[in-house]
Structure formats: C-alpha cells, structure tokens
Image (cartoon, coloured by chain):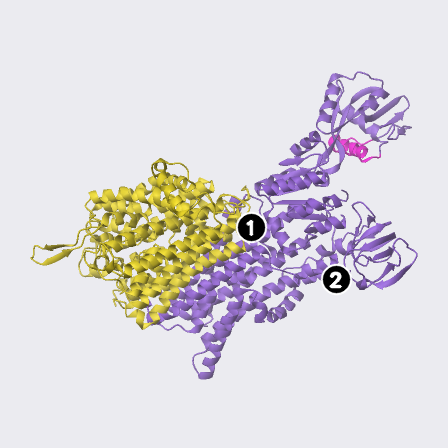
Amino acid sequence: MDATTPRAGRTTALRADQISLFDRRIALRAIGDAIVKLNPARLMRNPVIFVTEIVSALVSFVALRNLATGQAFAFPLTIAAWLWLTVLFATFAEAVAEGRGRARAESLRRARTDTLAKRLVRAGDRSSYQPVAATALGVGDIVLVEAGDLVPSDGEVIEGVASVNESAITGESAPVIRESGGDRSAVTGGTTVVSDWLVVRITAASGSTFIDRMIRLVEGAERRKTPNEIALDILLAGLTIIFLIAVVALEPMAAYSGSVLGVPVLAALLVTLIPTTIGGLLSAIGIAGMDRLVRFNVLATSGRAVEAAGDVDTLLLDKTGTITFGNRMAAAFVPAPGIDERELTEAAVLASLGDETPEGRSILSFARDRFGIVAEPPAGAAVVAFSATTRLSGLDAGERSWRKGAVDAVLATIRLAAPPVGFSQSVDRMARAGSTPLAVAAGGRLMGAIELKDIVKPGIRDRFAALRRMGIRTVMVTGDNRITAAAIATEAGVDDFIAEATPQDKLDYIRKTQAEGRLVAMCGDGTNDAPALAQADVGVAMQTGTQAAREAGNMVDLDSDPTKLIEIVEIGKQLLITRGSLTTFSIANDVSKYFAILPAIFIAAYPELGAMNVMHLATPQSAILSAVIFNALIIVALVPLALRGVKFVPVGAAALLRRNLLIYGLGGIIAPFIGIKLIDLLLTLLGLT
Amino acid sequence: MTPIGWAQIALVLALVALTAWPLGRYIASVLAGAPTPLGRLLGPAERGCYRLAGIDPGRGMSWKAYAFALLMINAAHFLLLYAMLRLQFYLPLNPQGMAGLSPPLAFNTAMSFVTNTNWQAYAGEGALSYGSQMWGLTVHNFLSAATGIAAAAAVARGFAGGGLKQLGNFWADLTRITLYVLLPASLVLAVFYIARGIPMTLSAYVDATTLEGAKQTIALGPVAFQEAIKLLGTNGGGFFNANSAHPFENPDAWTNIVELWSIVAIPFALTVTFGRIVGDARQGWALFAVMGILILAAIGVVYWAEAGGNPLLTALGVDPALGNMEGKEVRFGIPMSALFVALTTGTSCGAVNAMHDSLMPIGGLVPMFLIQLGEILPGGVGSGLYGIVVYALIAVFVAGLMVGRTPEYLGKKIQAKEVKLAMLAVLILTFSILGGAGLSVALPVATASLANAGPHGLSEMLYAWTSATGNNGSAFAGITADTPYLDIGLGIAMLLGRFAFLVPVLAIAGSLGGKVKLAGGAGTFPTHGPLFIGLLIGVILIMGGLQFFPALSLGPIAEQVTLLACKTY
C-alpha cells in the first residue's frame, strides 16, 4: 500500500468550502424550498409533520369560518399561524441540510463536462479511433486517453502508464500514477491525464459514474431512509397515533365534564404532544450525517453504511501506513561494551552520510533529534555509498574510516569473528522483536548496533485506548511474521493481530468475528482485498485502489488514508447519537406541555385545576399559545445541532448514556418549562394576550 | 400513616422479595423440563397427558405455531365456558337451582375468565352454580394463568440465543406450569385457607336466624381452592360478590397477608426466571427493581391518600387520624387495604379487599394509572413480564441510540419490525381504554349505568374500560356493569387487551429469536444497573402513562382539587 501517509493541512475540492451553518444564499433558497415541500404528497413521508399540516389546515379553516361568520377569530388564527410555522420550520430544516449538500455538489459538477472520447475501433490498436461523446459511451467500450484529455468515464486501465491529476474529485493536485494491472488500475471519469497515455475499458455508463453518484449522494436526491430511520419513523408515527386517540377521546370526556373544547385548542394540544421536534429534524440529521462524511472526503454508497459504521465493534487495520509509518527507522543506539552512546552515535552519523536510503536518513535525523548531533564530515573525507552488494555504507578520511551496515557485512569488514557477548545479545534481541539491527564500526573497531524498526505512529496507542473505551476492538493485519507482528501489536496496543496475513486470512477472520456477533470494519485497496471488503460490515476502499476494491466496499476514501476508519466510526456514532438525543429531548418535552395546556383548557369546567398551572402562565390563551410557539421555535433552535451533530466523546457506553440522558432527557423535561414561561412573559409584556 | 402500618406493608413485601429468587429459579427449571423433586412424583402424570394428547414435548414451535396453539386452546375454552354458563341450570352441582346467564353476560363472563381479567358483571353467590364456579371459572383461572406464563417463557427464550427458529412447545409449557407450579401451590394454599376457616363444601346455602330474629341466607361453596388460584394466578374473580373483603374469602389478617403475597409472588419471581432463561441474572433483577420501585411509590401514594382522611368529613368534625375508612374492612385497616389496592392493580389480579369506588380521588387514581401503564408493575402472571419487556425494548430503542449504536436489548438488534410490533401493542391499550371510555361518556346508553355525576362518574367509566383492557377485572363499582352495551363492549376490550397485545409480543419474540445474538462490550448499552432502571421508569411513565393524563385530569385529579375546595357533585 502506498500513498498512505496522512497529508495534513491541504485543502480539497470538497473540504475547501467550509459552509457556515446559515449561509445566506443557502438559507434564502431553503426558504423557497421549504414552501415547496409543504406539498402534502411529499410531506406524507414524514407522518408527524404530515399530521401537523392537516391539523394546521383544519384550524385555518375554523379561523376563516369564524372570520366569515363574525365569531372570535384572533385566537384560532394565531394558533393556525404558529402551527403552519411549525410545519415550515420542519421543511426548512430539511431544505437547509439539502442546500448545504447541493453547494458541495456544484464543485463536483464542474468536473463533469462534456468531452469527446476517443473510442478505439479495434481493441489493442491505438492507431485508429473515432470521436464519440462521453455520454454515448457504453460499458465495455475501449477508449484511448492521451496527455491533456479528460478521462471520459470510470474505467479500468488495460494498457499503458500515465500520471493522472485527480484533483477534481480528491482535491489533491499532485498527479498520481495509473497503470494497467496491479492495484492502481482504476481511473475515474472527470480526472485529467497529464502525461503519457492510457487505454481504458469503460466500466460505468454515463450517469452512473463515480462523480454522478457522488453528486446525487451529497444532494440527497438518492436519499433512501436508512433502517434505523425507518424504525424511528415507526416509533414517531405510533406516538402520533397514540396522542391522536388521546386528544380525540378527550373531546367527549370534556363535554361530559361540561367544557366544550374547540378545534384550535385540541389542535394545539395534539401538535404540542406529538414529537414534532424530532419529526421535523429527522431527515436533516440524516442528510447532515452524510454531509459530514463527504466533508471528510469519504463517500458512502448508502446511508445504511454510515449507520453500520456506528455499530462496528471490530476494526481491521493494516499495520503499514495505519499503525506504523511503513518504513524502518532508527529507534535506538546500543553501544558495544566499553563504548559510550555518544561515540557510537557520532560514528553512526558519519558512517551514514553516504547512505541515501530512507533508513540511512532516519539515522541522521534520529541522532539530531536525540543528541543534537549534526554530521560534519572531516575535511577531505570520501563517502562510501551504500550498495546492495556490500550492504554497508561509510566514510573514509585518511587513516580514519567509519562503516555501518548489515551486521555480518560490518563484522566481515573489520574481521571480527567473535563479537563481544553483550553486542551479540543486543542484536539477537532486536531480531526477535522484529527490528533490524545494523552494526557500526569506526577505525576497525566495533562501536555498537543501531536498531531500525517500523515506528508506531505517535498517539496511535491513545487512540486505540479511546476505541477500547468505546467498546471497539482493534485488530492489526500484517504480512510480518508472528514474532514481529506480536512486538508491534504490543507496542501499538491493539487487541489482536493477524500475522502473515493473506487475503483469505482476512476473510476468514472477518467471518469468524461476525459469527461471534460482532460487526467488522476494514479498509483495503487491492483487488485481492475485494472479497474481505464485501464481507465486512463496513468496507472502506481507497480511492487509489482498484476498481474491484471500490465496487466491493461500501465507502470510498478519497484521501486514501486508512487511519480514517476510526473517524468514520465516530461519524456513524455521532449520527445515531444525534438522532437518539433529539428523540429523547422531543419526548421529554411533553411533560411540560401538560402543565401548560391542561389547566388552561379545563379552567371553565374545573377552575380548581388552576393548581396545576405550576408555571403561573398569565391567561389560558397565553398558556396555550406559549406552548405552541415554544414547540415551533424549538425546531429552528435545534437546526444547528441537527446539522452539526451532537458532540461525540469517546467514552464507554454507560458514561455516554449518562451524559446524554442528563442533557437531553432531563434537559428535555426542564427546558420547555423555562421556555414556555419566557414566551408567556413576553406575550404578556407585549400585551398580546 | 403510622410506623406499624408501614411495618405491616414491609412484612408482606419482604416475604415477596425472599421468595422471588427460589420461586423464579424453580419456575425456570420447570419450564426447561429439568428434573425437579415434584417432577419425580408427578412425572408419570405429565407423560400420561402428552401420550393421551399425542404431543411430543420436545418438538419446538415457531412463534406462529406457538401463538396459534395458544389462541386455539383459548378460543375452544371460551366457547366451552360460554356454553357452560348459558346451560348451568341443566348441569350438575347446582343446589341453588341457578338459571343460565343471559347471552351478553355469558359472553362477558366467558371472555373475562379466558383473558385472565375476571371482571365480574354478575354477583357470584347470586348467579352461579357450584359447578360453574368449579369447572367453569376455577379451571379457567388455571388455564389463563398458565397461558400467560407460557407466553412469557416464549418471549424470554427469544432473547436466549441467536438464530432460534423455535420458542419452545406451548403444550409442554402449559402442562408443566399447571402441574408443577400452579396446582401444587394452590393445594397448599387451599389447605391453609381451609384451616383459617374459608369454606370448602358442596352443600347448599345455609338459612340462619340472626340475633334480631331476621332470616338470612348464608352463601357457601367450594371457596378455598378457588381462592388460592384466584390470587396466585392474578385472576381476581371472587367466589362472592364482595371478593376478598368477604369474611369467607379473606377471614383474618393472616389470610390477608398470604393473599397479598400470593398476588405478587409469581409476577416478581418471573423476573428471576427471565434472568435465568436469558442467561444473565442481572437483567432480571433490573426489571425486578423497576417493578419494585414503581409499585412501592404507588403503595406510598395510596396509603398517604387514604390515611389522610376525607376533608369533607374532617370539616364535619370527624377525626382525620382515622383516615378514610369508607369501603374498607376494619379487620384489615388502612395500610393493608392500601397495599391490597396497589398490588391488585399493579398486577392484573383485580381481587379487592376494599371498595375502590370509596377510595379518595388520588387513592383511586393510583390503581387506575397502574392498570393504564399496561399491568407491568409487576403485572399479571406472565403478562407483566412480557409487558415490561415491550417497554424495555422501547426504552432501549429511544435512548439506546444515544450511545451511538443501533439499539440492542440483550444482544438483539431492535429494528423496524420490533418497533412496529411494540408500538402496535402499546397503541391497542390506549385505543381500547381511551377510545372505549370516550365513546361511552358520549352515549346515553352507557352513561345511564353511572351511579355518580361529575368527575367521579367519569372516573367510574374510565376505570371500567381501563380494568377490562388491562385484564385487571377490579371494579371501581358505582357502575351497573350488566347491560348489553357494557357486557359486549368491555368483553371486546378484554379480548383486545389480552390477545391483541399478546400476539404482537410473540411476534417480537419470534423475530428477535431469529437474529444473531450480538456480543456485549463497553460500547453496548448496559441494560442493568441504576441508569437503565431510571431510564425504564422514565419511559414507562412518559411513554406509557402521559397519554392518559388529560383524561385523568378530568376524572380523579379534578375530583381531588374540587374536593379540596369542598365542592361535591
């Protein structure tokens, strides 16, 4: 795997536009969209808000009838207005979420221009082609793409090597190599070949290319309700019916008790009791969750995959690039008996001046970082460069000479048949731990050993610990032998590892883990990863990977950064947490509504029920109105939270639940008492009651 | 409220808590078909039953087969009981020559006993023959109780493992529960009751001359055995109209304590059984705690309301320290009456040792609310357990998302199907209670049955529909229940409350049983411990109870506040 080191601080096409929560253009357009979305046929998908709309229409009718017949109409009209606002706020929330996605899609659409493709007349013969509109290409067509051409559609390179600028989709302007065969054979429509040429077999018809799918995803056009969303919808619909029964049954009971409840009052009671808050924000939360993933340069093929990411409890992580930096670097200087560490370090630095390999350079930087030693070659020194045959490098300055390299090569150079026991032991220990030992000699004398090892990324151990607290096991996958793998696994703090892993091993491990009732996420890029990617509950394919891998996974990481798996899980969890928190908040809100509305509507029959007016709301009408207004405004007030998502803290489920229950459960009970009281005060102050 | 009163209450509850663990484990072994001491003794009888009916007790049933068997035997028994009640005049053991019941009353009564409701629109000693009481009602007290426990067992099994296709054998469950739990326990209790003076005879009623020289007919009958299963199976249908307030059903403090224990013993013990079956005792204890905390609060409120006396009488110079003794038996006093009120409505029992109509408004609100919550605190035998599991599923679904995973309860993912079925079950209760009561107060044919005007009248009607739907069977009284409208209407409410709730719950068990059982970990929602207990209490009150709040404010709450203002209707 290459191109795996995280590249910090760069901007991407998608990430570049950090859209503020209420961007003016988006907000303006959302207002228009919100009104369009009032169409009952569309609103029917959302049972809670649909019922609210019907009730609003009913109250409006009553208000207009009263107006026409000269009865009191101000109160029903005000209620009707706020009920309509409740519906509008809900559709507005969805429109804003969609608008943000659309803004992101625009930058993508720029990449999808109409180009002429060079379709080969005969496969295998580059000399003759006919120009065809990219949109007319079919799956299986063979096209030629030369330097300066746009790749007309998604495809597989079958011939040639070229550098391709993929900034249109990844935002990364440095070109990448695409070649036939191997793991870098996939090209994406809309990217540009900057040098050489490629022969490409088209794998996606026009309209279903990667970019097309991305656009539809971020726009929310292809949004289907996810399993959890459907379940939540059923719960909300069930609650709505329950409260509908309760409110309808209340009418005859009130009549029996001697108080006539009008439609506006019953409507107010119903709408404040049904879970309008979560009903209004549910789809916005889903769209925003997908948007967060896209902003993170990860594309999910479905919302289902994002939800599954939250459920994952086992992460399969490739060692190289994810857990370690991927190349061996100097990690320790172990002096031979009688030598001090600083002498050894200086010798090692001088001996490495002629070593241009990454290992050699790592020795210099390690020495600089650890001891502040910067190489100053003696005047007239001659560098002995590293070569694969000598397996050592060095420096010669007159009589003095320094050598560093493979242990046996160095020992042979200084003709030392029996190195000191201490040295041999250190070298053996390094080998056992999976490190590579190098020997250093100066002036024919053995100075000590350098330990080269695959360095575990700083901070990765803490992240794994955080994952463990969240209940997620990490499993390291590596081609190393068991001993090396065990050493690195211990150092990185993973829970398990698969050594000498073949693609089949990965697949078997995933199957075994799933049979234990766990959900597995993994990332991969090669064609041989495809079965495992497909088997995993969340398979993240790298954008640099093969077409097969990209098809098998249910997410594609445009940055090709395997560490992202961790963030993807967090985004999935955050989506579910936001949904759960706002549902809890919405349901908990109901308690206060009873104390606001019930005493107000029964005041005629039983004035003594005024004792239940614990908020001391001014008048029955202001009490009902305050509850309705609070119910409408809370939707708008929570739009930012729905779009941003509830803050995710990587702690155990019990701690997380305690925290969120306190904020959204208890807070949900208390907040409306305060809010309704404040609105009532304001209404009284403005003389509106 | 007095310390001695609380001590009496504590004594009963301590007995319940002490027996829950051994009894729950015993029931679990019985349900698993594991060898028990009684099994050695009665094993031949059990095997004889299977051979006679051609049943293979080891053959598991899918949830559909299980539900079908359950519905079929109950339907058959409904028809049998209906016929028996209509034809009792022609059947043996009828020394008083009781006539057959009218069709609506026979429908209502048959439905009532098949659904474990035991709502009584008739007066036992004035309408039923000994035969009807014995092989009509008593038999169904066993059948309906065993049905409930069997269904609870099936639901618990749905959580036990992964990829289950079967929930056990209904016939085996029914036979084992009856043979090894209900029958022997009833026998022991009946002997105790006989020893305390409860009649057990087939001789005719006795004519006596009172000290004043008046003639009085003293009703007798085979009471003791029916009394035992009436409470143990949370049935509640009394042999006599006065139920457990009658001296021949509940003669003294000792029988009262034993009756109280036997109402809640099995429902609480079943939480332990649940823990055993799902393989995690803590899960059972969490449900036990939720039931215990809420029922304790309910007991406290009733006791407080009744001990405070009636302000209207206090204004007339009655000592409030006596409490509200209207409708209560002096031999039980306020605390043991209050405890009975809460336990009989917290379960689906419905037996009474004090008249609920005479409770203070708040004292009457508690039993009504306990039933409206779905009879889960601790609920009827079996039905309480599967009822609270439905709320646990809803609680886990709503709050479980807040830990950032698709909610799961006991390792089973809760998805659209389960939510749909759970909401359906909860919806049916609301529909039947509020719809029935709402419709009835609008119909003169129904309001004619009410003895009281004002909020108390509304409470009476609300209570009737609540009691029927919740399969409780206790009456607020003050309502003439034997009218064709109420007989049939409430009969349908009982049917909905029992089977329209039970079938979706079995479907949930079937659906969950087939799912993979996920391994728990630090990332999964913990469904034991104080946090979950608090959450479940909140969900039961907010999602199970709030919808009844508007109706309750017009009934008992309005009555309470107007009473405090010294207003009567």
**Image quarter (top left, top right, bottom left or bottom right) of the N terminus of chain A:** top right
Instruction: Relative to A331, say whether A632 is above or below.
Output: below
Colour chain B appears in:
yellow
- SS for tag 1? loop
Q: Is residue A364 magenta?
A: yes
Colour chain A appears in:
purple
Name the chain under label 1: B
Within 10 angstroms of label 2, few (less than 14), some, or many (20 or more) residues? few
Residue at image mark 2:
A207
State the mark number for residue B406.
1
Query: In the rendered structure, which amino acid carries the disc numbered 2?
Result: Gly
The range drawn in magenta is: A356-375
Depth check, front residue: A631 or B267: B267
Query: In the rendered structure, which amino acid carries the disc numbered 1?
Result: Thr
Q: Dividing the picture into quarters, in which one does residue A514 lie? A: top right
Q: CA distance from mark 1 to mark 2?
A: 33 Å
Residue occupying the point 26% across, 55% down: B132
Q: Is residue A74 magenta?
A: no
